Image (tube, coloured by chain):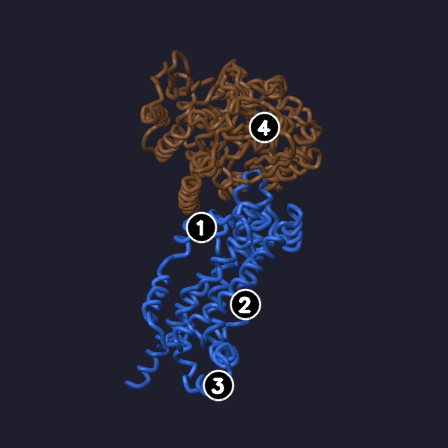
Amino acid sequence: MSTTVTRTRLAVATATAGIVVLAGCSSSGSSDQASGSSCAPAKGKVTLQYWNTVPGMDKVVALWNKQHPNVQVETKNISNDQYGTLGNALKAGKAPDLAQVGYDELPNLRTQSAFVDASACKAATAAKSKFVPWTWSQTSFGGTGVFAVPQDTGPMALYVRGDLFKKYDVAIPTTWDEYATAAQKLHKADPALDITFFDPNNAEWFNGLLWQNSAEMYGYSGDKWQVSVDSAQSRQVADYWQKLISEKVVRTDLAHGSTQMYAAYQKDQIATYVGAAWGYSMFRDNLPKQAGKWTVVPMPTWGTSGSSGDWGGSTVAFMKGSKHLYESVEFNTWLNTDPDALALENKLGGLYPAATAGLDLPALKQGVPYYGNEKIFDVFAASSKKIDTSFAWGPTQKTVNLALQDAMAKAAGGSGTLDDALAAAQAAALKSMKDQAIPAEAGK
Amino acid sequence: MSKPSVMRESRAGRTAATALMLLLAVYFLLPVYFLVVASTKPQGDLAATNGLLFSHFDLFDNLHTLFTRSDGIFGRWALNTVLYAVLGAAVGTLISALCGYALAKFRFRGREFLFSVILGGVLVPTTALALPLFLLFSATGLVNTYLAVFLPSIVSPFGVYLARIFADAAVPQELLESARLDGAGEFRTFFSVAFRLMTPALVTIFLFQFVAIWNNFFLPMVMLQKESLFPITLGLYEWNGQTARAPLLQQSIITGSLVSVLPVIVVFVLLQRFWRSGLAAGSLK
């Protein structure tokens, strides 16, 4: 079923792609010279375009619009084909002033010169101290520019069915070694029970695991990219999961977020979920009968390192062609640091804020009824602080993800291993960069 | 001896045919049945319970959530869909009737050529036209307005074809001539005589257009950006893209789908008598 959906989406996306591109050709007379470096307030009323995928964002924007009659913001939801829509608009010279871009997609769009550097605006550079450090280093690409403002993050943790662990007298794991042992014990106690599932079509999730182990995929020095998707660090993660897959103590037949996945959880067939902060509502809303049975503990660690990983999260980027950089900065910093805005985004869109002030939102300080009134967000806040700040994404992340998924599916099917997947992704990244004439070499 | 065996055979044949029909009916109705069942469940039961069995009956809660979500935007979408479909189909039918009648009853140079071109239009899928239409509307500044979806909806080459065939068959030339002799102008002749005789075909055309516009997804997706102009199809699609962050949207999408198919069923049940005679008349020629 999911293949059909993807195909339709693809068809639709391709069709719209053509349309926007052509639209760009037809209106090539318009000028888009506004180079972004100057930062002067506009005279009179300004209207900004802001494209995003967050449910309920129109409400947040309405709040801003009410308070700022001279800077009105229009939103457009592009959740069905976020980067397709954005890419086409860029090609057509009709990009919005601001757009939601995931951290892992930032470098790719930057090599396509999609962004404008807002560091000429004082308000932009001053915002740095208001965000969790790793988020800011990714939006500035480790430099002094400001190409986007962090919006939300996905610090990872382990969701655990405490009751099942108790029932089979298995200790809740704190390291990955203990996790593997627990996997064996649970599966032995009940052959229908697995500790978790490995979704071969979810490279983003796997990347979160790599991140935790500081498996840097990219480096940049000497005017060259160093690709190290296939490294000792990443192999450690791959070998670990390969072992669990080979021993058949994790499920490989479930797609993340699918009805089948929820059904398996509902039938007590899976005992944990290696997930991010934004995932808390998935279980609450889809498995209400398991209220009180779930608990959230820190992500299992590698040996003595306490590092955690991040899965997902987005920024709001300053898009090239915007004629109102000053106002864009004003709105963007308000959107991602104002407590009222953050609270609304968390409530309506489930965003876990990237702003440090956001971690203290009342909603994130309370016990969550579904999780036995535990303060689960304390766990995520702690996780957030332990995320490797030097991890950086590269310009060919999408290619890497696709190559990973292709090979991970084979590994899950028993032909090939996750190590092969890393090798394939490494080769795909290098080839893609060569094709785009981006100087790159294999890193160590 | 042979006679009863033949009868038995034919009875067996009939039973087999009925069984096959029954099977097909179940096959076609199963998704609708699923939709009805799923619409009555709370979000938490969608994955957790058997998809074809009822669990908690939450239909009214679901409807309430659906119509109050995001300040009642779904009601707006429903209204838009009705507007696009009813008005579009009505105007489209009228235009088709006028064209078909003219092609059937007036002799003029290039008539058959014109008809062939229109027939050719039947073969072009509307999806293929979305792109050129977008460019056209983009140039005229009509993109992202009601008209962007409405104007293309009132054109139906198939309607013209059907109207012509039917006018040929059902409107006698003599009747038109006597109307003219009685002093009726061309428009009067059309509306008082021909239009009435063509009613069954026109209902068919209306239904075709109504369903086509109601289910239209691609054209609005290409043309519209403002949520307040969306038809239901596009609105539900947009919601579907957000379920990862807002899981409860899924239930509203399912309930919304049920609500969106009901009017089509109602219209079909009400107009099916005309529909059948209209189709049959078209097939004769």
Query: Neighbour class for label 4 at 10 Å: few (<14), some, many (≥20)?
Result: many
Q: Chain of mark 2?
A: B
Q: CA distance from mark 4 to mark 2?
A: 47 Å
What residue would you read off at disc 3?
B179
For the residue labelled by badge 1, is the local secondary structure a helix, a strand or a loop? helix
Q: Chain of mark 3?
A: B
Q: CA distance from mark 3 to mark 1?
A: 42 Å
What residue would you read off at disc 2?
B267
- Vertical order, A386 against A289 (above or below): above
Going by the numbered disc 1, the residue's amino acid type is: Leu
Q: Earlier in the sequence, mark 3 or mark 2?
A: 3
Query: Neighbour class for label 1 at 10 Å: few (<14), some, many (≥20)?
Result: some
What residue would you read off at disc 1?
B136
- Vertical order, A416 against B75 (above or below): above
Residue A393, quarter of picture: top left
A257 or B225, nearer to the observer: B225
Q: Earlier in the sequence, mark 3 or mark 1?
A: 1
What residue would you read off at disc 4?
A151
For the residue labelled by badge 3, is the local secondary structure a helix, a strand or a loop? helix
The answer to whether tags 3 and 1 share a subunit is: yes
The answer to whether tags 4 and 2 share a subunit is: no
Going by the numbered disc 4, the residue's amino acid type is: Gln
Q: Nearer the viewer, mark 3 or mark 2?
A: 3
Q: Chain of mark 1?
A: B
The answer to whether tags 2 and 1 share a subunit is: yes
- Quarter of the image with the C terminus of chain A in it: top left
Residue A244, quarter of picture: top left
